Amino acid sequence: MTRVRSHKGRGKLACVTVYDAGMARLLEEADIPLALVGDSVGMTVLGYDSTLPVTLAQMISHTAAARRGIRRALLIADMPFLTFQISPEETLRAAGLLLKDGGADAVKLEGGALRAATIRALVENGIPVMAHLGLLPQRVRAMGGYKVQGRDAAAADELLRDAQAVSAAGAFAVVLEGIPAALAARLTAAIPVPTIGIGAGAGCDGQVLVWHDLLGFSPAPSPRFVKRYAELGDAARNALRAFKADVETGAFPAPEHEYS
């Protein structure tokens, strides 16, 4: 975690979500330093309408798959809903399994001051923790949807206290999601560990995007904070249509695709 902390105020850290070995190999070849096995896998890969149904077993499986493609990047695994809210014992066991069976280097969990004791307990047991503040997808029901957080003074002050609490508890970095850019810059300046933004402006110490958003696999239009660096969804659809047409017309397989 020292190499992540060393980026505080020095340079921007790039982080991308990853869910399998093939994605992980591409991420490695692009020299992305942080790989997040997000519980967003529930929506991007498994077809759920939120992250809430994702299980610990699914997260371990996807983390282990990503691990087989990761060599240099720091591999962080999300702790899914109900794996860190019930008891300290269950939290430690779940986090430990993400490292032991999944091969993660660290775990990420949502929540601020409420989770400080949990973060401290994990860190004291040798499990590095990334915190997550602002828009919390696992609390989407309580938040009334995917809405920007911290827009009034009281909410902003609470997020500042949360950031200070998780940092003091031992989190090596903090994800800031869905908050105003000025507030994200304020939180970044207030804590000694790096912040990784998603929908939080340019003032963070790094940025994370979901694989499917970044590469244009997710449906358009994208959220405001997303930059689509490619439109691979269009390329894939065109390739599939071309394959179908070739099969239907007999153009594929051609002699060069056959064995004598």
Image (tube, rainbow, N blue to C red):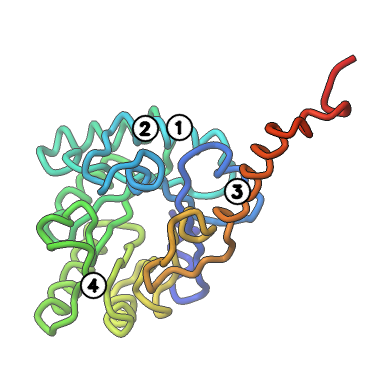
Q: Position of residue 65 (x, y in %)?
A: 49, 33
Q: Which callout, 3 or 1, points to the residue nearer the camera?
A: 3
Mark found first going from the N terminus, 3 or 2: 2
Residue ID for mark 2: 60
- Marks 1,4: beta carbons within 8 A: no
- Are dots 1 and 2 in contact, CB under 8 Å? yes
Residue corresponding to mark 3: 236
* 171 on left or right of 203: left
Q: Look at 28% across and 37% down and name the residue there.
A: 95
Q: Position of residue 235 (x, y in %)?
A: 62, 53
Q: Are marks 3 and 4 in contact (CB under 8 Å)?
A: no
Task: Point out the image quarter for the N terminus.
Answer: bottom left
Q: Amino acid at mark 4?
A: Val
The mark lying in front, picked from 1 and 4, is 4
Q: Residues within 10 Å of mark 1 (few under 14, many from 20)?
A: many
- The residues bearing labels 3 and 1 have C-alpha atoms spaced at a distance of 26 Å
Q: Which residue is mark 1?
A: 64
The quarter of the picture where residue 231 lies is bottom right
The amino acid on which the numbered mark 3 sits, given as a three-letter code, is Ala
Tag 1: amino acid: Ala
**Which residue lies at the image location 40% right of the left edge and 80% below the top edge?**
203
Residue 218: x %, y % from top left? 45, 55
Q: CA distance from mark 3 to mark 2?
A: 28 Å
Disc nearer the start of the sequence (3/1): 1
Q: Which residue is mark 4?
A: 148
Labels 3, 2: front one = 3
